Image (cartoon, rainbow, N blue to C red):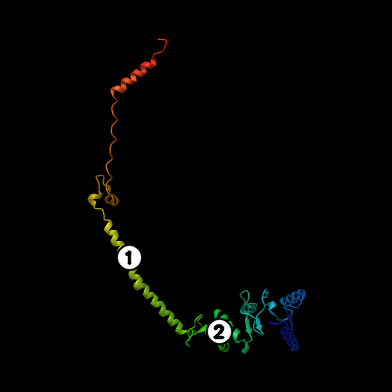
Amino acid sequence: MTKKQNCEELANNLKLKEYDCRCLHGDLSQPDRNQIIHDFKKKEFPILVATDVAARGLDIPHIRTVVNFDVARDIDTHTHRVGRTGRAGVKGNAYTLVTEKDKEFAGHIVRNLEAANQEVPKDLMDLAMKSSWFRSSRFKRGKGKSCFKERPGLGSGSCSESSSSYESFTSSDKTGVQGGRLSTMKLAYKNSYLSKFRKATEEEGVGGTGGVTASMQEQLMPPPPPTMAAPPPPPPSASSSSGGNEQKERKRKSRWE
């Protein structure tokens, strides 16, 4: 339930029909809410009528059925309501009661069912199609064909055909124009490689020792220039030698001699 007043009213009507149930909403104190949840987990009563205060945070594995007496305020809250059942791999059922006033919210329920790969009832689909936003977002503008714009549902044959034709067109385009460009580039690189490099012959490559001495790089690289030998140092002159002897003789002389 969305409103606490409607929650209390529904719980009282069920009690009048001799159904054992409890009511849970935000106006109750925290100890009372904890006690009701504890008794429900212990299976002391089979029916719990609650507002969105019980939509999140409750993990009770034995819940098999959830009934939305009225629609939630948003699709996230609706998802949390439904998530109270079918937990930990256990199967469960969730029912939502909708009226003509809920046509705007019916589209969200249809999307959730399609996302979960579940069957959408025809009455629910007809009600959702009365909503302008759902109808405009589901079909292409200006066309009444059954080709969905966002999420294709069941029986969308034209969409599958168009997607297959598009994929075939893109694949042919890749193998045609792009494949020709790629082969042309490969051929150009191959021709440039063959024009610059040539294979070494056996006469040039085999030396006297039986091993290959001339490689492809040696054939392509020019020979290094000859190195110039350094000139020999000039011979010592006679004047320089005589000058050195005079200096030695001067050093040997002393003032006492």
Quarter of the image with the N terminus is bottom right
Q: Identify which amino acid the numbered label 1 is placed on.
A: Met
As measured in the structure, the alpha-carbon distance from the residue carrying label 2 to the one carrying label 1 is 51 Å
**Among the 4 quarters of the image, the one containing residue 252:** top left
Name the residue: 68% across, 79% down: 52
Quarter of the image with the C terminus is top left
Where is residue 98 drawn, in percent x and y? 63, 87
Disc ID at residue 133? 2
Where is residue 235 drawn, in percent x and y? 28, 27
**Which element is circle 2 on?**
helix
Where is residue 75 drawn, in percent x and y? 61, 79
**Which element is circle 1 on?**
helix
Query: Would residue 53 be seen by someone viewing this image from the given angle?
Result: yes
Other-residue count near label 1 (Cα within 10 Å), few / some / many at <14 / 14–19 / ≥20: few
Q: Identify which amino acid the numbered label 2 is placed on.
A: Trp
Q: Give the vertical position of 244 relative to 115 (above or below).
A: above
Disc with the residue nearer the chain's start (2 vs 1): 2
Q: Give the vertical position of 89 relative to 102 (above or below).
A: above
Disc ID at residue 68? none
Name the residue: 34% across, 21% down: 244
Instruction: Identify the residue position indicated by label 1 in the image.
Output: 185
Q: Is residue 75 left or right of residue 51?
A: left
Other-residue count near label 2 (Cα within 10 Å), few / some / many at <14 / 14–19 / ≥20: few
Residue most extreme to the front: 255
Name the residue: 63% across, 82% down: 94
The nearer-to-camera label among 2 and 1 is 2
Q: Is residue 159 left or right of residue 1?
A: left
Q: Is residue 118 left or right of residue 32?
A: left
**Among the 4 quarters of the image, the one containing residue 28:** bottom right
Query: Would residue 99 be seen by someone viewing this image from the given angle?
Result: no
Nearer-the-camera pick, 32 or 62: 32
Residue most extreme to the top: 257
